[in-house]
Image (tube, grey):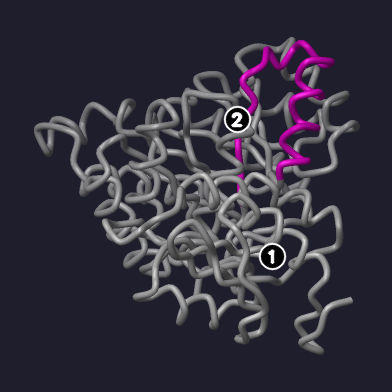
Amino acid sequence: MKRKVNCGGVIIGGDAPVSIQSMTNTNTADVKATVEQIRRLEDAGCQIIRLAVPDLEAAYALKQIKAAAHVPIVADIHFDYRLALESMRSGVDKIRINPGNIGSEDGVRQIVQMAKERHIPIRVGVNSGSLEKDILAEYGRVTAEGLAESAIRNAELLEKHGFEDIVLSLKSSDVRMNYEAYKIVDSRTDYPLHIGVTEAGTPSRGRIKSAAGIGGLLLEGIGDTMRVSLTADPVEEVVFAGQLLEAVGLRHEDIEIVSCPTCGRTEVDLEAIASGIERRTEELRQRGVSDMKIAVMGCAVNGPGEAKGADIGVACGKGKGVIFAGGEIVKTVKEEDIADELIKMAVEYDKNSRRFD
C-alpha cells in the first residue's frame, strides 16, 4: 500500500479511492475566466485542479482563485523556484515541479522548506519530453527505465532535504512505455502515483490511448490519482476519467446502461434506442433514479437473459420489444415506444420492493 498524502483534504494514496484531476487551460492571471472554468470542472466531478503558473502575475492571482475554489488547487511550476514560493504564499494545496528543471539545488531547498512549514505536498512530475540530458545519454533515447530513474532520482533530491510528502508521476505519450515506467516505479517506491498518458491527443484518439494506458494500470492496482489528457475542453477529461473508473470497477455507476453490439439478427434500430436512453440518464438522476441497471438488447439469443438480470430491460424482436422489470416480463411495446417506456418504468420502479409506484 502506498503512503498517504493530504492534498487540501483529498487523500492521495493509502486506501483512498483514486481521485480525478484536470488542468485549466485559461490564462491563470485572468481570475474571472479561470474561476469560471474551475466551477465547470467542479460541477463535472473534478476533485483536484491544477493551474499553470508561468509568471509572478499568475502566482499572485492564485490567492483570489484559491478563495473562490471548492476543491484543492495545484500550482504547476517550471524553471523558476520563486514561482513555487509565491504560489505557496498564495495558499495552494500542492505544487507540481520537476526538480531537474527548477534551477539550483538551493532553489529546491527553499521550496522544500516552505512546503514543510505549510504542510504542502509536492508532486514530482517527470515527462518524456523533458528528460535530463545525462539520462538520455545513458539510455540513448527516452525509455521506461530512464523515466523511472528520473522520477526516483528527483524524489531522492527532495528526501535529501528531509521532505517525503511526495506524489510521483512519469508520463509519456507512448502508451507501452508509459505503462512500463509506472510498473517499474510502483515496484521500487511506496510513494503514491499520479497516473496518466501525456499528450494523448484529440478526444477520439486520446480516449483510446488513455483507456489503454490508464485502464491497464488501474487494473493492475497501480495509481492513486489520475488525469486524462485531451486536446479539448478540460471538462471532457473529467467526464471520461469518471467513465474509465466505472469501467474498471473502481467507481459504482449510479445508472448503468448495457446494450448489445447488434448483429444480423437485430430487427430494430437498437443504436437509436440505446443512445436515446443514454442521453436521458441525467433526466433520470434529476428524477431521483440511482443504483439502477438498464439493459437494451437486440434479439432473442442473449437478450432475455441480460434483460432479466437488469433492474429494467428490453429484449427486442421484429419492430417491438419485450420489457422486463425485476426479472419478470411486464409488457410488449412497439419499437418507437421502447425508450420512453424504459425511462418511465425506471422512474416508477422500486427495485427494493420489486413494484411500481
The answer to whether 32 appears left or right of 272 in the picture is: right
Q: Nearer the viewer, residue 195 or 153?
A: 195
* Distance between mark 1 and mark 2 Cα atoms: 23 Å
Q: Amino acid at mark 1?
A: Asp
Q: Secondary structure at mark 1?
A: loop
* Residue 172 visible to an observer of this rendering: yes
Q: Residues within 10 Å of mark 2 (few under 14, many from 20)?
A: many
State the residue at coordinates (81%, 28%).
Answer: 90
Q: Nearer the viewer, residue 258 or 184?
A: 258
The residue where tag 2 is placed is 234
Q: Which residues are magenta?
A: 20-44
Q: Nearer the viewer, residue 252 or 104?
A: 252
Specify whether residue 314 is painted magenta: no
Q: Nearer the viewer, residue 10 or 266?
A: 266
Q: Work out which residue is located at the far bottom of the displayed protein and give it.
A: 353
Rendered view: 258 above or below 236: below
The answer to whether 247 appears left or right of 292 in the picture is: left
Q: Amino acid at mark 2?
A: Pro
The residue where tag 1 is placed is 254
How many marks the image carries: the answer is 2
Indicate the position of residue 222 as horizontal and vertical percent values: 42, 64
* Residue 3 visible to an observer of this rendering: no
